[in-house]
Amino acid sequence: MTALMIHGGAGTFPEESREPALAGCHRAFAHAQALLEDGRSAVDVVEAAVMLLEDDPVFDAGHGSYPDTEGRARMDAIIVDGATLDFGAVACIGNVAHPVSVARRVWEATDHCLLVGNDATTFAHAQGFPCVPDEALLAQGEKPSGQGTVGAVALDAAGHVAAATSTGGTRGRLAGRVGDSPLIGCGAIAEDGVGAVSATGHGEPMMKLMISRLVLEHLRAGLTAEEAATRAITHLEWRFGGEGGLICVDASGRIGHAHNTEHMPHHGRSADDLHVTGLTDRG
Ligand code: ASP
């Protein structure tokens, strides 16, 4: 009994990037689904899915990141293990292709949960992650602000859940700004027996609400995955007028998603083999 869902960011995707964004989600889903069927752990699966999405320049994560006010690619990422509640995260990291893998290394190779800024970049390079120049990471041309943060949630065959989120940040953000994505309970959360959540959207209101934690508590209280995601997005809109999206999986492999933006490319499969995919259906 396994389940998997991925997203490619909540926002407005212009006509020309809609098909590539959906295709990118399908590719990442297919790759991660194969790993899940091979018996790999939920943590491995969400990392692998997010790495592929970070490689795809249609998304605002890894390659394709929006510049900050200094013209640099500075990225945030988190990965969470529902079995232990361990997580690793990086914020304002530069010059790496896969912030999600550096986040995992923070958790696995240090006693810490979150590293930031130049020190996070130095850590990554010291750990053997190759140095990637800003020009290779930055979004090319007039990439519109259809936000393309990426994320994944999974339930593996052993009953463990995991979540990961990675972003190149919001367009025009102040240098040094950290969004919701690398913050536990905001950009992602996971807990065995309850579920896993990945969030995307305008980070400031989402972190005020600790929106991923909110979804998790809705799941704990017995809401379905779809209801939990929808209720949290409704709350975000009501309380702050915030815009965003969520994906989640519960402990029995039901999947849910919601967004109040025009688009949120996503692809998922529940434990009872229900496939959900699309760009525009609104939760
Ligand atoms: N939540 C991300 C941030 O505020 C952006 C996004 O999801 O599109 O950095």
Image (cartoon, grey):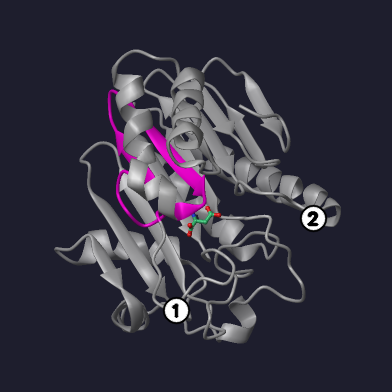
Q: Residues within 10 Å of mark 1 (few under 14, many from 20)?
A: some
Magenta range is 180-203
Q: Identify the mark at residue 175; answer none if there is no mark.
A: 1
- Residue at image coords 62%, 55%: 148
The percent position of residue 256, horizontal first and vertical second, equals: 52, 25
Secondary structure category for the residue under label 2? helix
The percent position of residue 134, horizontal first and vertical second, equals: 56, 84
Q: Which residue is mark 2?
A: 17
Of the two numbered discs 2 and 1 on the same chain, state the one appearing first in sequence.
2
The percent position of residue 48, horizontal first and vertical second, equals: 50, 52
Q: Residue furthest left?
A: 111
**116 in relation to 159, above or below:** below
- Residue at image coords 48%, 81%: 95
Does 132 lie within the magenta span?
Answer: no
Which image quadrant for residue 145? bottom right
The amino acid beneath tag 2 is Ser
The percent position of residue 163, horizontal first and vertical second, equals: 40, 43
Which image quadrant for residue 212? top left
User: Is 90 on the left or on the right of 16, as rendered?
Assistant: left
Q: Is residue 43 visible?
A: no
In front here: 4 or 231?
Answer: 231
